Image (spheres, rainbow, N blue to C red):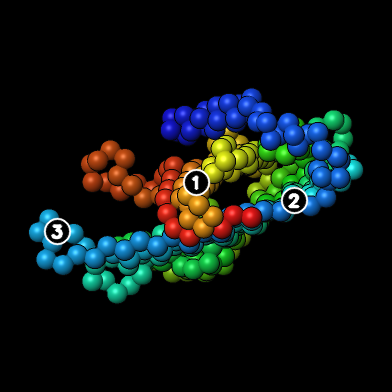
Amino acid sequence: MKKIVLLLAMFIILICTSYSQTTEAENQLRTQSSDSTEGWKKGGVISLNLSQTSLTNWAAGGQNALAANGLASLFANYKKDKSIWASSLDIGYGILKQGKDEDLFKTDDKIDLLSKYGRQAIKKWYYAALLNFKTQMTAGYNYPNDSVKISGAFAPAYILGSLGMDYKPNDDFSMYISPVTSKITIVIDQNLANSGAFGVAPADTNSNRVLVSEGKKARFEIGGYIRMEYRKNLMENISILTRLDLFSNYLNNPQNIDVNWETLLTMKVNKYISATLSTNLIYDDDIDIAGDSNNDGIIEYVPRAQFKEVLGIGFSYNF
């Protein structure tokens, strides 16, 4: 939990530092006519990164490896009069083939679609409604054991809908606050649902371990929600997108806040070559993860901080 607090502090510092800097280009933008700041603003980045390692009679040892990662981060924002509408789509997928193993291992897999509409209330505050859908495309396994399935398409899937207020001081930053948010967790795979994966109610069995009732494929939560997003060109060839989602379930342990923090840093070498660094920090009190906390050989299933980092250098197209 200390790591999460530290990372959240870094997030706030990053926003405050960057927000205090006003570039010459931004000053010029403010002097343009209102027609240039109203209407649609679209953009994004698409990247494909490949890496290969081939070894022949290599005395130091090692394994052949082939990896590929694809990423698409797109957005479309609309602003006119008192209305704003922001939509984004993030898709990522990665695979790895290592050594003589013929199987491909998944290294990244996500679909994240969000749409938010706001109507100006006063100055930089908007009445707003938000809808967010997250899932993945293919099954995930407890590697290196590829016979134990631990996730799949729509297992899990998350649907989040809320009403609240959106604070938007400029085109780079927004903070959405909702006291009334519904969150639905879907686990469409019955075997995973029976095991109680991702917080759904598990199957009920009798004393002889005979199935009495199947596990629930959906879980409903209602609570408070905060979402902060920051998108900016830090330098001519460096851009950052970072999002932080905080959710508190009023119905169960509201003091245990779910955290989802994603960051995408893009560094362009030229028009088509760039490096991308994406990170994802997750803490969900309803997801138990196996681990040996005390290094005593005893495996415990408890909520743990999850972290993913993907670094790639390859083809990239910004628009």
Indicate which label's residue lies in the foreground, 3 or 2. Answer: 2
Between 301 and 86, which is closer to the camera in this rendering?
Answer: 86
Quarter-wise, where is residue 101 in the image?
bottom left
Secondary element at tag 1: strand
Q: Amino acid at mark 2?
A: Lys
Q: Residue at x 43, y 33 (%)?
A: 3
User: Which residue corresponds to the image point at 44% horizontal and 69% vertical from the top-left?
Assistant: 210
Residue tagged 1: 267
Q: CA distance from mark 2 to mark 1?
A: 21 Å
In this image, 173 relative to 273: left or right? right
For label 3, the residue is: 61
Quadrant where the image shows the C terminus = bottom right
Quadrant location of the N terminus?
top left
Q: Secondary structure at mark 3?
A: loop
Direction right: furthest residue: 81
Q: Amino acid at mark 3?
A: Gly
Which mark is first along the chain, 2 or 3? 2
Mark 2 sits on what residue?
41
Residue 18, visible in the rendered structure? yes
- Report the residue at 58% width, 26% height from top: 17
Q: Residue 13 placed where, x, y %?
A: 55, 27
Other residues around mark 2 within 10 Å, as few (<14) / some (14–19) / many (≥20): few
Between 282 and 270, the residue placed more toward the observer is 270
Gap between marks 3 and 2, in whole Å? 51 Å
Left or right of 18? Residue 206 is: left
Q: Position of residue 295 (x, y in %)?
A: 24, 40
Residue 96 in percent (x, y) is at 36, 64
What residue is rendered at 86% in x and 40% in y? Answer: 34
Q: Which sits earlier in the primary sequence, circle 2 or circle 1? A: 2
- Amino acid at the residue labelled 1: Met
